[in-house]
Structure formats: structure tokens, C-alpha cells
Image (tube, rainbow, N blue to C red):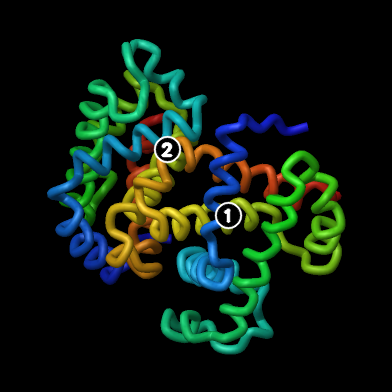
Amino acid sequence: MVEWTDAERKAISTLWGQIDVGEIGPQALIRLLVVYPWTQRHFGSFGNLSTYASIVGNAKVAQHGKTVMGGLETAVKNLDNIKQAYAKLSVMHSEKLHVDPDNFRTLAECISVVVAAKFGPSVFTPGFQEAWQKFLAVVVAALGKQYH
Amino acid sequence: MSLTAKDKDTVRTFWAKVSANAEAVGADALSRMLVVYPQTKTYFAHWKDLSPGSAPVKKHGATVMGGVADAVANIDNLTAGLLDLSELHAFTLRVDPANFKILSHNILVVLALMFPSDFTPEVHVSMDKFLSAVALALSEKYR
């Protein structure tokens, strides 16, 4: 089981309490699709992703960003049992969506960059960054757990 | 995944905005790396103080960013321009190249923190490519 210090729990709940998934989610997904364009392979049904402007303006990208970011709520609410809580989602990403689990780590990095830009250095301190990235790493591991 | 002319322009333009604060960027990135990826502390066992913003961290952050500035100046031929630094890292420092990626990530986080409106997704992709290219050039002499 993952051990969380009180400081880490506080950091995660503080950040999550201030995150608007409808704002951060789309920005994170846009960054993923722009910075790592091969990730577009999973979004063939989203329409035009051929230019920066088209990605930024794409309503399906925005909606999906919100959905994915909202999915972190499960982890925040189940901090002591993230692996179990994401078992079904892990199976889905493996069997149905066929997503290379390395993409989860890449998206987590994008989320951290967007959160950093949003909150600035006085909130997103090194200590908060440590807790946040540890949190995302646990989610990433859980999502990859059911792959075989 | 080599740097296009557009990437190089983007990096040079963005760097012009960053360079005045390069030392602060370096200090913060290094501080964060040591906190968020504690295994990286193994390279600095000889420092008295590894806490964020400490004197050795600040000094070394400035050194590292000096190297990044060199890389920007040599962006058209990173392998040649960073040869000495590559030899230093390969034979003297022997830093596991996996750590270049870790430090790069923290540099990008600090750039997002300090330049939230300038560090757009387009700047982000060019900077990420650039730092990857720098890491590759630094790894040149390893084996």
C-alpha cells in the first residue's frame, strides 16, 4: 500500500480543491497532443487535429480533457486504495482502448506543467510538486496494473 | 526528431525572455529535482546542504543554466558545441543519462511557473525537443 504523509495528503487536497477540471483538463490534453503528436493516434474520431489552432479549437478535445481530468476524483477520494479503485479503468485502457501505458506518464507530466502554470511558485512549491507528482505516479501505476 | 528551423527560432526567442532569470530558473529546477526525485541526491553527497534554494544548489543551478545558454548559442550544431561538456559528463561526472530527462522535466515545470503566458504549448514542444537534443549531445561521449 502507498504511504502518504500528512503533508502529502494536505498538498493533494489543497491542489485538487482549487483545480477546475474543465479548465485544467483541456489544457493538459492540448499539451499532450501538441508536444507529443504521436498521441493523436488515439483520437482519430475527434476530427481535425492537423494544426495547433485546430487542436486548441477542437470541442471533442476539450470535452475529453475534462473527462480525463475528472477521472482523478476517484483517486483523490480513494487515496489509500488507488490500485483497486482504478482496476476496471485499467482493464478498459488495455483491452478496449489499447493505450500504451507510457502515455499515462506523459499525460501526467503535461498535467503537472499546466498545474504549475496555473498556480505559480508560491502555491506549487517543491513540496507540493513532490506530493502532486507522487499522486499522479500512483494513478499512472494503477492504470497500467491490469495490462497483460 | 531533429530541431526544425521553426523550433530553433522559437527556442532563441523564448530564451531571450528567460536569460535574464536563467540563474533563478536553474536554482529552482535543481531544487525541485532534488525534492521530487530524491534518487538524484546521490550525485551531490559532497554538498553540505541539499535543501531548496541552498547556496550549493543556487551555485550549481547557475552553472547548469550556463550550459543551457551555451547550447542555445550552438543550437545549429549541438554535438560539436557541447563536446567538452559531454566528455565532462561521460568521464568525470558519469551521470546516468536517464537523469537528463528528469532535470529537463523540472526545467520545463519552472519555465511554466515563471513564464505562464509565454510558455505556450508551441513553445513547450520546441523547448522539450531542444532539451532532448541537448541531452543527446551530452550523452555523445558516454560509449
**Furthest residue to the bottom?**
A47
User: Could you tell me residue A19's position as x and y percent?
Assistant: 53, 61
User: Could you tell me residue A109's position as x and y percent?
Assistant: 52, 53
Toward the viewer: B7 or B109? Answer: B109
Type of amino acid under label 2: Pro
Residue at the disc numbered 2: A126
- Identified at 36% across, 23% down, the residue is B51
Which quarter of the picture shows residue A4?
Answer: top right
Chain letter for the residue marked with disc 1 in the picture: A
Type of amino acid under label 1: Trp
Toward the viewer: A10 or B71? Answer: A10
Toward the viewer: B60 or B48? Answer: B48
Q: Classify mark 1: residues with Cα within 10 Å, few (<14), some (14-19) or many (20+).
A: some
Say above or below: B101 vs B7: above
Q: What element carries label 1?
A: helix
Residue at the disc numbered 1: A16
